[in-house]
């Protein structure tokens, strides 16, 4: 099975659902057809480094 790729915008919007709109991770993951752990990871990454989270296209963080 091939891994799906998500745009930076998609990840930021998904994280926003959880952090700003108060949607639970499990509910947001179901709504977006994601695994809960994937969404939890995105929330953690964004919280740890909001400026350079999800650089995209195989770009590593500085």
Image (cartoon, rainbow, N blue to C red):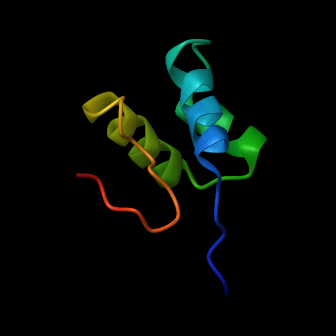
User: Percent from the top left, x then y, of residue 61?
Assistant: 29, 53
User: Percent from the top left, x then y, of residue 53?
Assistant: 39, 41
The residue at the far bottom in this view is 1
Q: Is residue 9 above or below residue 59?
A: above
Quadrant housing residue 8? top right
Q: Quadrant of the N terminus?
A: bottom right
Question: Between 17 and 23, which is closer to the camera in this rendering?
Answer: 17
For the image shown, how many numbered marks are present on the structure? Answer: 0
Residue at (54, 31) in percent of width and height: 15
Q: Is residue 26 left or right of residue 19?
A: right
Residue at (50, 19) in percent of width and height: 19
Residue at (45, 48) in percent of width and height: 54
Question: Between 62 and 11, which is closer to the camera in this rendering?
Answer: 62
Q: Is residue 23 left or right of residue 51?
A: right
Question: Between 26 and 20, which is closer to the camera in this rendering?
Answer: 20
Q: Is residue 52 above or below residue 54?
A: above
Q: Is residue 44 above or below residue 22?
A: below
Residue at (44, 50) in percent of width and height: 55
User: Percent from the top left, x then y, of residue 46?
Assistant: 38, 34
Question: Between 30 and 61, which is closer to the camera in this rendering?
Answer: 61
Q: Is residue 23 left or right of residue 39?
A: right
Q: Is residue 13 above or below residue 29?
A: above
Quadrant housing residue 11? top right
């Amino acid at each position: 099975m091939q891994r799906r790729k998500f745009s930076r915008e998609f990840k930021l919007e998904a994280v926003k659902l959880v952090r700003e709109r108060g949607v639970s991770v499990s509910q947001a993951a179901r709504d977006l057809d994601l695994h809960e752990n994937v969404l939890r990871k995105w929330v953690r990454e964004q919280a740890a480094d909001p400026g350079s989270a999800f650089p995209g296209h195989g770009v590593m963080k500085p």
